Image: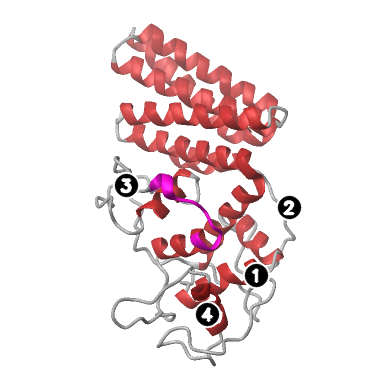
Amino acid sequence: MKKILLTAIFVLIFSIQTVLASFSDVSDNHPNYKAINYLYANGIIIGYPDGTFRPEQNVLRAEAVKIIIAPLYETIEEASASPFPDVLTSDWYAKYVLKAKNEGIVAGYGDTGNFEGARNVSLVEYLKILLIAYKINVDDYLNPSVQIFKDVADLNAWYIPYLYYASATNLIHADSNSYIWPAKQLTRAEVAEITYRLIVNIKGGETQLNLSMAEAEMIKILQYLDENNIDLAEYSASNAIKYTQKAYDLAPNESIVQAAKKIAEAFDYLVKCYRAGLEKNYTEAESKAQSAWNAANDSINLNSSVSTLAENIKDIAHDMAELARASM
């Protein structure tokens, strides 16, 4: 059920029209189908001559820079000088790397000053290059006081603001065990998904950004409840309410925003039900479960695109109410 909910939550994201591509290895039920096709339709990524996209293939650092840089500038001149000791002007990616260097987006490594374009790009490397290139301000995520990923204990690491921003705005999310795997080597499909989500946020403006942040908190609620961490679940539920309210204040007539607000309320009621159950207040638990069911049902009437998520919430709420009644 948790996996179904995680998948269904993503229907809240605003839809961007795409021209559908025909990659032989990316079916319409592929989890990154929309992202891949949007980026292809907008000339941000391309496929291979044999008609494949190769979604599971790792992305080199040189490829990552081209994917990010190419759509941001109308013209990119050929490299007249080597940007890094290990990048020749004759290399196909030299002009993109040079542009990225001149714009302050990438820098060389350590004592060698090399770019290491032939190395697979990691999650945190891609996030840093992407967010700097799109001029995203991550200052609010410097020096966080709370560890949110089990495998990221050093909150002073260079990549923390980029990682925390990406998590907060739904560009990425931890696995079911709250691991994010910062050194993970990204695939073409993963790069497409992260890039697409950032573009959706940018194009959707502040309204979409708030919806994306609410989605990220909903995902955290599921993870925290799975870990029996009710305090953090309550904190994320409160944040989801806050962000959907901000989206509603900006776009009160958008049915998807109205539905998202109800979904956030439903999650909040589920968390309150869980708390009441822990405290053996079963009458209160039953009441909160019913409220969660009602809020989820209301969301369907507002926008049918959230129906899968809402029906799953209703099922959970029903089961929790039954358990509360049985415990009385």
Q: Is residue 213 above or below residue 16?
A: above
* Nearer the observer, 7 or 24: 7
* Residue type of the residue flagged with mark 3: Asn
10 Å crowding of disc 3: few (<14), some (14-19), many (20+):
few
Mark 1 or mark 3: whose residue is earlier in sequence: 1
Q: Secondary structure at mark 1?
A: loop
Q: Quadrant of the N terminus?
A: top left
Mark 2 or mark 1: whose residue is earlier in sequence: 2
* Nearer the observer, 257 or 94: 94
10 Å crowding of disc 4: few (<14), some (14-19), many (20+):
many
Residue 98 relative to residue 200: left or right: left
Q: Is residue 8 visible?
A: no
| Residue at 62% over, 72% down | 70
* Residue type of the residue flagged with mark 2: Gln
Q: Secondary structure at mark 2?
A: loop
- Residue picked out by circle 1: 73
Residue 15 relative to residue 161: left or right: right
Q: Is residue 156 above or below residue 236?
A: below
Mark 4 or mark 3: whose residue is earlier in sequence: 4
Mark 4 or mark 1: whose residue is earlier in sequence: 1
| Mark toward the viewer: 2 or 1 | 1
* Residue type of the residue flagged with mark 1: Tyr
- Residue picked out by circle 3: 143
- Residue picked out by circle 4: 98
- Residue picked out by circle 2: 17
| Residue at 54% over, 42% down | 212
Q: Secondary structure at mark 3?
A: loop
Evaluate if marks 4 and 3 touch, with contact meaning CB atoms under 8 Å apart. no
What separation in Å lies between label 2 and label 1 (alpha carbons)?
22 Å
Does the magenta portion include 6?
A: no
Q: Is residue 179 above or below residue 282?
A: below
Evaluate if marks 2 and 1 touch, with contact meaning CB atoms under 8 Å apart. no
